[in-house]
Image (cartoon, helix red, strand yellow):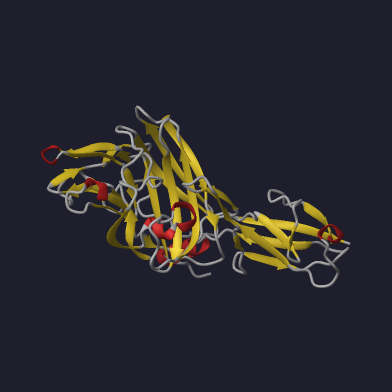
Amino acid sequence: MRKMNKLGVVLALLMALPIYAQQLPDPHFENWTDKFKSDVQLADWHGSNVSQIGSKFTFMFQKPGRTGYCAYVTDRAIGIPKLNLGATGPGYVSLGRPWQYLKGLNLNSATAGTEGGIAWTYRPDTMAVWIKRVGPDTEKEDFHLLFYSWVGTAKSSLYKNKAGGCTNTERINEESDIRSATDGNECGIDEPVKQVAEGWYRARAKYDEWTLIKVPILYKNNGAPTMCNVIFSAGNYPAFRANDGLYDGNALYVDDVELIYSSRIDKLTINGKEWTAFNPNSEKVQTVKLSALGAQNGTIKIEGFRGIGTLTNIKGEKARFNGRKLDAKEMSIEPGEVNGKPFVITVKAEDGSSVHTYKLKIEN
């Protein structure tokens, strides 16, 4: 047999490897630059640094990490003494761009947020991130770990300000215009978008040692996103929009972010009715009675869903995410027979990293 050259060997090995879906840029926070002519900053992520009325305040810093470097963000008291202006600002890092706006010298008009994100087409199931959370008042305010994706372009021109009113400033794909169910723009959304997914973890807690937090990502619909954003916040942002409820010195270390793509089924329906006894962790034969589902003989339609759950929005209300239906690329079914051979369901993770096989024995 003819010997394969080195290039052929490399190509063969690459073809044998699974094709992994998207991960976030610079997930280990190693790509720092001084091009911003201030404290060294991440090249692919953006800190909530403030540059206004001739003053600059840095909220994101490079620190030794769990591996290599990490991002360190901290709430900070900022002020302009000569104008008698002062407030505590939120420390956070985002793939989108943090913004601040003050109308003239009117402190009550102050508002802020995050707009934009990155191009994105995949549907991960979990965001895993290593953190440390420190500070003098960690029990007084939440820190936030947030992922959200959407399709379309949101536009608005009014945002909640420090005095509780609305300040006029035009923004595109602003976080509160996208996350209408959990952190919606209270001043109204001019052009809404279709939010696809959200994973949101918040807690009033202190972590002195590196701790792995896994954030489930929930789905509002079956849609495919075109953009996503991620926010890691040391304090009460995005829950507070305009420098309220923030505590100077509360800080968050963030390192080694990973998006996990699952091959499990969260919910299974047979002929349109959920089978509540389904065990998503078992690959053994599971038996289901059609009579228990109120189903009849004939065509058996099996559908699987992922990303189902409930989030509490900033008003304390429950926002329900019904999940998304697994499509033909992710889930295939080998037909069985009622009172006969099992139906075999094969589910593949979107990134090809894992496969689950379920066997359902369907009986009258």
Task: Count up the numbered dots.
Answer: 0
Kindly tell me whether residue 139 is visible in this rendering: yes
Where is 35 relative to 249, above or below?
Answer: below
Where is 113 relative to 72, above or below?
Answer: below
Lateral position of residue 44 relative to residue 269, left or right:
left
Residue in the picture at 41% in, 32% down: 140
Q: Position of residue 68 (x, y in %)?
A: 33, 40
Q: Quadrant of the C terminus?
A: bottom right
Residue in the picture at 26% in, 41% down: 59
Rendered image quadrant of residue 75: top left
Q: 163 or 132, which lies in front?
A: 163
Rendered image quadrant of residue 269: bottom right
Q: 153 or 16, which lies in front?
A: 153
Rendered image quadrant of residue 363: bottom right
Kindly tell me whether residue 96 is visible in this rendering: no
Q: Position of residue 193 (x, y in %)?
A: 44, 66
Q: Position of residue 168 (x, y in %)?
A: 28, 59
Give the farthest residue toward the bottom. Answer: 299
Lateral position of residue 309 relative to residue 11, left or right:
right
Lateral position of residue 144 relative to residue 48, left or right:
right
Q: Position of residue 344 (x, y in %)?
A: 74, 62
Where is 343 relative to 98, above or below?
Answer: below
Residue in the picture at 29% in, 51% down: 111
